[in-house]
Amino acid sequence: MMNDEMMKQMPHLMGQGMGMMNHPVTQGAMMAATGFAAGRGLLGATLFRNPLLLLVGGIAGGIAAGYLLHKYEKEIVLGVSKATGMGKDFALQQRENLDDLLAEAKENEAQASTAAAAPAAADVQTQAEA
């Protein structure tokens, strides 16, 4: 039997478990699982087991995709060209960043070698004077 203390803790315990259900990844997984189960129940027994129906379904899907591609051809081309341009810009920006990093590393290396050479030259002069 549940005592009063257990009843007081129940909303807190339930809230922790249900908090995970509000996460977008969890919601997406639940939607995918529901869609898979519904699709399998409706189509799985007939469509996926009969090769002729599978072929007809594939052809119908191809026709629908072709129609949509033809209807929205300009928008698709603009979107793809924009994405390609963004990719090129990103690659150029990364190349510039890499060049900057390499130049900075070479400068640091040159400064380190100059700093190491200066005390060695001073040691040579003191030995020559002595």
Image (spheres, rainbow, N blue to C red):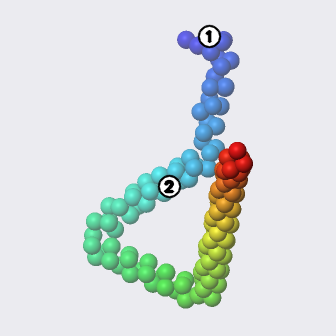
The residue lying toward the viewer, choosing from 6 and 92, is: 92
Q: Tell me if 72 is positioned left or right of 39 in this view.
A: right
Q: Residue at x 64, y 69 (%)?
A: 99
Q: How many residues crowd mark 1 within 10 Å: few (<14), some (14–19), many (20+)?
A: few
The residue lying toward the viewer, choosing from 2 and 14, is: 14
Q: Nearer the viewer, mark 1 or mark 2?
A: 2
Q: Is residue 25 above or below residue 78?
A: above
- Tell me residue 36's x, y (percent): 44, 56
SS at mark 2 in the image: helix
Q: Residue at x 64, y 37 (%)?
A: 19
Mark linked to residue 114: none
Location of residue 109 by image quarter:
bottom right
Image quadrant for the N terminus? top right
The amino acid marked with disc number 1 is: Asn
- Tell me residue 124's x, y (percent): 67, 50
Q: Which residue, given by chain and number where applicable, does mark 1 sit on?
A: 3
Q: Is residue 90 above or below residue 37?
A: below
SS at mark 1 in the image: loop
Q: Residue at x 39, y 57 (%)?
A: 41
Q: How many residues crowd mark 2 within 10 Å: few (<14), some (14–19), many (20+)?
A: few
Q: Is residue 59 above or below residue 21?
A: below
The amino acid marked with disc number 2 is: Ala
Regarding residue 83, the answer to whether it shows in the image is no
Q: Is residue 78 above or below residue 19?
A: below
- Tell me residue 63's x, y (percent): 45, 84
Regarding residue 99, the answer to whether it shows in the image is yes
Q: Which residue, given by chain and number where applicable, does mark 2 sit on?
A: 32
Distance from Cα at disc 1 to Cα at disc 2: 40 Å
